[in-house]
């Protein structure tokens, strides 16, 4: 007499499934890490860390609808030590974290008798500076950055490609807009920089040629200018594909098998 029997998965099949699962998960993580490594240093966040919820933007001169709830942005004054080889690497952020300045080693050259550079970051209203050339328009606050040697008080000029500005910008209504860091030596004409734009956290960062004035400019109707959004999408798709493959392998490996004796 023939009867149907149900056999449990073999231990070797279970071990194989676990091994394959581990390989796929490690591959997914490495894929995400490799892609995120191409982003700006400020865009590299741990995988599966969730989406950051930005805090309310602080305006120097808020729109009337936001004036009642607005808090004033915070300025900041910082010092970076200067040696015979120039200034040391430094990262400065205002207390509200709306403005960050990253200085590479040697950003300020050594000057005789000087032991530090004092950097002052002051948020200002965009009405105090000239507008950007269309189609760009300044959004949020502008920021004035002053740098002087200590103890002389003489102006300190930053070396090319050694200073990076990281600015938070307010939530805007434009659905398809790019944001660029723009800089100006005097607040009258603005030069856009190649920018990493992270709309999910309203943050943009770029190398800037001068410290004097920086701001975020928006170009309505354009695709995001930075690599963040496109690369993050590629990472998400790659991880999703790896997870689907993992589920298929587990289903095919661990499902009960029916045989006849």
Image (cartoon, rainbow, N blue to C red):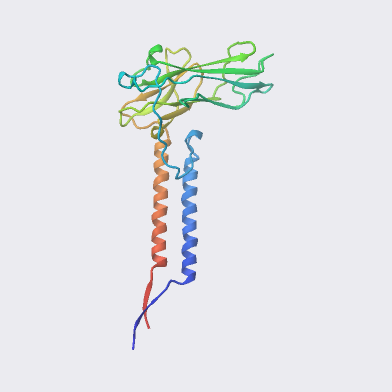
Residue furthest to the front: 68
Q: Residue furthest bottom?
A: 1
Give the quarter of the figure containing the C terminus.
Answer: bottom left
Q: Residue at x 43, y 29 (%)?
A: 204
Where does residue 6 sit, x and y in percent of width and height?
38, 76
- Quadrant of res 153: top right
Task: Assign the N terminus to one quadrant of the image.
Answer: bottom left
Q: Position of residue 16 (x, y in %)?
A: 48, 65
Q: Position of residue 179 (x, y in %)?
A: 39, 27
Q: Nearer the viewer, residue 68 or 108?
A: 68
Compared with residue 39, is residue 88 higher up or lower down, i.e. above or below? Answer: above
> As rendered, which of 56 and 158 lies closer to the eye?
56
Q: How many numbered circles does the render carry?
A: 0
**Left-right relation of 80 to 41:** right
Residue 203 vs 112, above or below: the answer is below
> Residue at horizontal 39%, vertical 52%?
241
Residue 12 visible in the picture: yes
Tell me if I can see residue 195 in this picture. Answer: no
């Amino acid at each position: 007499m023939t009867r149907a029997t149900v056999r449990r998965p073999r231990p070797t099949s279970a071990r194989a499934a676990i091994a394959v699962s581990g390989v796929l998960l490690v591959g997914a993580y490495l894929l995400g890490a490799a892609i995120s490594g191409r982003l700006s240093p400020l865009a590299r966040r741990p995988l599966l860390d969730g989406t950051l919820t930005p805090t309310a933007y602080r305006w120097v001169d808020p729109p009337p609808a936001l004036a009642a709830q607005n808090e004033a942005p915070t300025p900041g004054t910082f010092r970076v030590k200067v040696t015979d080889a120039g200034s040391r690497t430094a990262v400065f952020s205002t207390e509200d974290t709306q403005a960050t300045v990253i200085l590479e080693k040697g950003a300020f050259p050594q000057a005789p008798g000087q032991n530090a550079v004092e950097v002052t970051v002051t948020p200002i209203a965009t009405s105090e500076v000239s507008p950007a050339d269309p189609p760009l328009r300044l959004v949020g606050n502008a920021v004035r950055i002053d740098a002087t040697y200590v103890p002389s008080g003489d102006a300190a000029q930053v070396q090319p490609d050694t200073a990076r500005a990281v600015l938070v910008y307010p939530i805007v209504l434009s659905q398809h807009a790019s944001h660029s860091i723009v800089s100006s030596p005097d607040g009258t004409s603005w030069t856009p920089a190649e920018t990493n734009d992270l709309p999910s956290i309203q943050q943009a960062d770029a190398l800037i040629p001068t410290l004097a004035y920086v701001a975020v400019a928006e170009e309505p109707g354009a695709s995001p200018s930075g690599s963040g959004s496109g690369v993050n999408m590629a990472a998400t798709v790659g991880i999703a594909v790896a997870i689907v493959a993992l589920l298929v392998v587990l289903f095919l490996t661990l499902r009960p098998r029916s045989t006849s004796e």
